[in-house]
Structure formats: structure tokens, C-alpha cells
Image (spheres, rainbow, N blue to C red):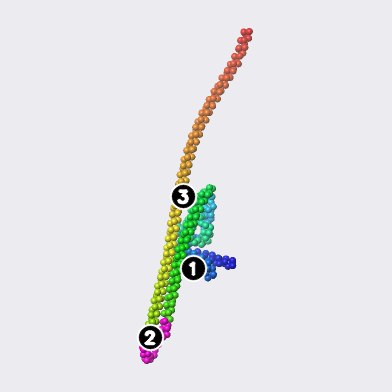
Amino acid sequence: MARRARSTDDRETAGLDELYAAPLDEFTAVRDALAKQLRTQGDSAAATRVKALRKPSTAVWTVNQLARREPARMEALLRAGERLRSAHGGAAVREAMRAQHDVVWELLQRATNVLAEAGIRSPGDHLDSIRVTLQSVPTASEHERELLRSGMLATELEPADFGDVMEMLAARPGGAAAEDEEEETRGAKKASRREREAEEAEEEEVAEEEAEEEEVAEEEAEEEAARGAKKKTSRRERAAKKKPSRRGEEPEREKKTRQAKPAREKKAPRDRAAEKAARAAEKAARAAEKAELRRQQTRERAEQRQAEQAERRRRTDLERAHEKMLREARRLAELVKRAEATARTAEREAQKAERAAEAARQRADKAESAAEAARERAAEAEDARAAAERELDEAKPQKSSRTRTKR
């Protein structure tokens, strides 16, 4: 049983690989054929999953072809995204962003060739969506990255918010506030994506229901036309069998003339039935034409809705990018303003410290001068004391001699 399940999964995987490698205008036909094949093989669940796959946009199809034609560059893009997610510090972030930018630019050059080879009109109109998807790799989920690596991406990726990534990396040492803000941003993005996917799924379901109704109406019209044509053919055969031969003698002709009137009377209901069958066939043909017209209109409306959704997503992405650039510009301006204020404060403190140091040097010079003068006065006082002691010593012998003379 497990071997059979693996075999079924392998068939489905191989079929999906062939489906996403097929030209874009053949996607629906290949998908329906794959679903029919899986249902014939008894895997109704896989057939239902394949039948529900939506035709990718031109940008997504091009990205899938790049993954198949340029696997080395796509792997380099995934590695650059991993480096950006795990980068610490401004230098590492800048290096990872530079590496990612280089790979995205190379893949965009290859995307131009893919679009040209596929005969896509106005390939430049799709390059912006391709660039957004490629730049969104760092913020994509692991499942989305695996789909991108295998070239089976079904929808465009959300725009990568590099400003938020940089703020998150810068706030890692202090942690909690930045992580909460990032979690809220991711939650909002996931909710927006889920809403858009639900809306697209609902629109696709409505389109499929309309297509099924049109197919049923077309089949009924074809069956009605076939029944009418069959009845008409049967009546003509019966009429041909009952038609008398033109060969024969004159009495046979007279007999035909006598029988002509009842034959015409019997033929009238058959003619009305034939006319009714013809009208039914014509009605069935008109119903088939209407069904085909409705199916074509449904396809056109679906394509128009897809184009409008793509345009709305592109505008939303541009608006988000513009708002993020404005936020980043305001944040940088605030940082510059704070840095300038800090620089001015530091300059004032430095000037104040320099003046205090100059005053201290002046006081030190004055103290040194006062000490030098004190030392000079002390030396002079010492010299005067020494002179006084010498004079005193000289005066003592003279006094002793005068005392002896008096005696």
C-alpha cells in the first residue's frame, strides 16, 4: 500500500513538473489532461487537486522557467536570502543585500530572453512583477522557497520588506519591541494574502461552475441536434423505401396518380416532423453557439479579472514600497537630526572643557610663579639668617675681650 501511494505521488509530482514546464498558453490543456489521467488511474484526490490549480500569471510562469533554466543562479538567490535572514550587523546586512541585488539583476536579464522566446507581448510590463517576486525571497516561507527552487510556484510572492528586516536586525540586542512589531507586520501580510487567495478561489470556483453549466448546455444542445438529425435521416430513408419506381407501363403511372393524393396527405405529417426536427437542430446549433459565446465571455471575464487583480497587486506593492520609502526617509532624517544635535552638544561640551583646561593651565602657571617667588624669598631669608648668625658669631669674641680688659 505504501509503495502504491509513493508511486501515485511520483506520478503526480512528475505530472506537475511537466505542467509547470509547459508553455503558458498550454497550461489549461495540460492540466486537464493530467487530471483526467490521474482520475483514470484511480487517484481522484490528486485529480481534484490538479484540476483546482490556477493558471499562473506571466510573471510567475517566467520565474518558474528561470528556476529550470538557471538553477545555479536561483540557488544563489536563495542563499543570498538565507544570508540576509541570518545577518548580524550593518556590514553583513549590506553585503547580503548587495549579493541579492546582483543575482536579481542577472535573473532579470535572463527573464527578458525567456519572455521574448515565448512571444510575450510587451515583456517590459512583466519585469516589475518578476523583480518583486525575486526580491521577496528573504521573507518567503520555507514552502514557497521549495516551490521556487523546483520551478512550480503558483502565485507571486509578497514584496520583501528590507526596511523591516534591517530594523529587526538592528533591534536584536534589545529584542522585544522590534520582534513584536515584525510579528504584527507578518500577521497583517499573511491575513492580506489569505483574503486575496480566498477571493481568487471564489472567483475561480464561480468561473468553473459557469464553465460546467455551459458544457452541460452545449452537450444537451449537441445531443438534441444529433437526435433531430437522426430522426430526419430515418424519415428520409423510410420515405426513400416507400417511393415507387419510375419504371413501368402507363397503367402503373395512372395507379400512381390515383395514389398520389393519399400519399401527399400522409406525407404532410412527415414533412412537418422533418421541419420540426430541422428547427430543433437549428435551435440546438444556436444553443451551442450561445454556449460557446458564453464560455468565451467567461474566459475573457476571468482573464480580465486576473489582469485587474494583477494590476491591483502591482499598485498595492508600489504604494507599500512608496510608503515604506517615506517611513525610511523620515526615520533617517530623524536619525540625522538627532546625530547633528548630539554632535552640537558634544562640540559645546568640548569647547567648555577646553576653556576649563585653559583656565586650569593659567591657574597652574600662576601657582608656579607664586611658588617660584616664594622659593626666592625663602632663599633670601635663609641668606639673611646665615648672615645674621655670622655677625653674631663675630660679635661674641669681641665682647669677651672687652670683659677681660675691664678686669
Eye-nearest disc, 2 or 3? 2
In space, the residues marked 1 and 2 are separated at their CA atoms by 54 Å
Residue 199 position in % (x across, y down):
46, 61
**Mark 3 or mark 1: which comes first in sequence?**
1
Residue 25 horizontal/vertical position (percent)? 46, 65
Q: Quadrant of the C terminus?
A: top right
Marks 1/2 in contact by CB < 8 Å: the verdict is: no
Q: Earlier in the sequence, mark 1 or mark 2?
A: 1
The N terminus appears in which quarter of the rendering?
Answer: bottom right
Q: Which residue, given by chain and number where applicable, does mark 1 sit on?
A: 32
Secondary structure at badge 1 equals: helix
Q: Which residue is mark 3?
A: 328
Front position in the image: 251 or 212: 212
Q: Which residue is mark 2?
A: 263
Q: Residue at x 52, y 30 (%)?
A: 364
Q: Residue furthest top?
A: 407
Residue appearing at x 41%, y 85% in the figure: 242
Nearest the viewer among 236 and 153 is: 236
Q: Secondary structure at mark 2?
A: helix
Q: Amino acid at mark 3?
A: Glu
Q: CA distance from mark 3 to mark 1?
A: 47 Å
